[in-house]
Image (cartoon, rainbow, N blue to C red):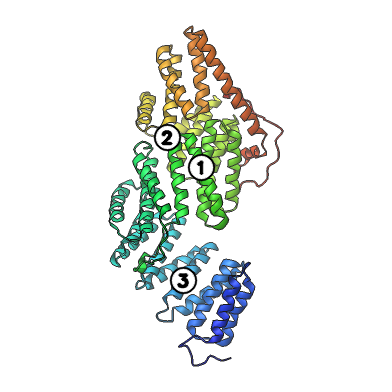
Amino acid sequence: MSMAAGSEAPDSWYLALLGFAEHFRTSSPPKIRLCVHCLQAVFQFKPPQRVEARTHLQLGSVLYHHTKNCELARTHLEKAWLISQQIPQFEDVKFEAASLLSEFYCQQNLVDSAKPLLRKAIQISQQTPYWHCRLLFQLAQLHTLEKDLVSACDLLGVGAEYARVVGSEYTRALFLLSKGMLLLMERKLSEVHPLLTLCGTIVENWQGNPIQKESLRVFFLVLQVTHYLDAGQVKSVKPCLKQLQQCIQTISTLHDDEILPTNPADLFHWLPKEHMCVLVYLVTVMHSMQAGYLEKAQKYTDKALMQLEKLKMLDSSPILSTFQVILLEHIIMCRLVTGHKATALQEISQVCQLCQQSPRLFANHAAQLHTLLGLYCISVNCMDNAEAQFTAALQMTTHQELWTFIVTNLASVYIREGNRQQELYGLLERINPDHNFPVRRFLRETLKMSNAEDLNRLTACSLVLLGHIFFVLGNHRESNNMVVPAMQLASKIPDMSVQLWSSALLKDLNKACGNTMDAHEAAQMHQNFSQQLLQDHIAACSLPEHNLISWTDGLPPVQFQPQNGPTTSLASLL
């Protein structure tokens, strides 16, 4: 068979080989070896450059996605990119080859090969709006993964301006919202405000595909909600959160239109509908947890995890594992507050397993994982292990808020141990080097701030601590005024530690005031809470996963040796 009359129409041999290759690729299960054989056979016919380049791309793509033959995949993708650059009007093959090859380089940790490749592709794609925008997003994502947020923001700014010039307000909004997300991560709040305001205007004014419009609104509102939550503004965020929840309900009723946008630069989606749904559950969990509605947080976590399990059966997108880890991190903290340590420990183990499957996930969440183990260690009174976990976590993070959270918890370990004054003062010096806080007014200020924003746990903790101080000072009436609402709030959350502490204080208060009946009732409550905590303590320490408290470096261990029973004292908990 010969290449008849050249390249006007594809020859029948070529169409036949392509048909066979596609048939084998889409078989169930796929017959990849046969698919590759068919595509390789194309080269036997000395095809023209266009067919040669396209076949190299198809082979590279099949080998990259379906086999472990990295070297061969790389060779075909590099040839596709090289040959296609010499052919005029061959944009799709040229830029798809560049995009896929740079993705391959990143997967092989050859980031320094990916960057110049993407820059070159961006430079020569300015007449092709879809590919120019897509490649800009790809290079910005690469910089983000490398934690170079400044370069990523610059590229997203370039993309936003390009999208405006080619008349795509939709993709302009996507670039700007992505930039806003990175500015939030960098804590550049003075730049975030005007950018979000501009995005809000663009999103509201854009008239296009309803699903695309609503997905832009979800992106915009997610940024607004996380911005409020970052600032601890749990009450102020409620209207935004409500809008976000209504928005996701609207999206779930809309049907995906098959009509493609007329502007090729509009051919982007932020996230699939199902992923957006999980994300809205996730920010709702974050809000419920910060506000101290832990049963609500539990309800939404269950819904989100159930949906994630279904999605992961069909979708291997890494963002789903990230969502799962963040949800588990939140619910673990809830469990420790509500006195369910054994369940928390099993969920910590789940996070370990997810992190083992993905080096990138582990790199991004190792500090949080050690922090959670540190909190668990405090809850079961293993103070040496808590100190080791927090110390490990501190070495793994540069994130300011997480650093402060770890250091304050480490300070609480030193306080509990009682003989660590030197280390404690050293830590306090690091937390507040300027000594510019009015120390005497700490608790009253905390109470005022937490009350103003409905931060229930912070309010309950401040009330019980103030109540304790007044009790020690002999001001029983003022102490009672603090402890009673602390107890009510702690029951509503529910916060087991504050309930235990409040019931002990109420018992002592009523005893001191001669209220025998009330003192007896408080003592009974205290006894009940103590029993619940004791049973949970024994259950947690008996789990094989309890051995995780000794892990402080490297990847988390895969298997755990069974425990003989609790080896820690419960005295200080009660």
Q: Tell me which amino acid carries mark 3.
A: Glu
What SS does tag 1 mark? Answer: helix
Q: Which residue is mark 3?
A: 96
Please tell me which of labels 1 and 2 falls first in the chain: 2
Mark closest to the chain's N terminus, 3 or 1:
3
Q: Tell me the quarter of the picture where residue 95 sits.
A: bottom left
Looking at the image, do the residues carrying marks 3 and 1 touch, with CB atoms under 8 Å apart? no
CA distance for labels 1 and 2: 15 Å
- Label 1 crowding class (10 Å Cα cut-off): few <14, some 14-19, many 20+? many
What is the three-letter code of the residue carrying label 2? Ala
- Give how far across and how far down residue 60 sits, in percent: 55, 72
Q: Amino acid at mark 1?
A: Thr
Of 181 and 309, nearer the camera is 309
In front of the other: 88 or 204: 204
Nearer the observer: mark 3 or 1; the answer is 1
Residue 7 shows in the view: yes
For this rendering, which residue is in front, 75 or 10?
10
Residue corresponding to mark 2: 291
Locate the N terminus and report the quarter of the image it occupies: bottom right
Q: Which residue is pictured at 38% across the width and 43% down the height?
A: 241
Tell me if 487 is positioned left or right of 160 in this view. right
The residue located at (53%, 74%) in the rendering is 58
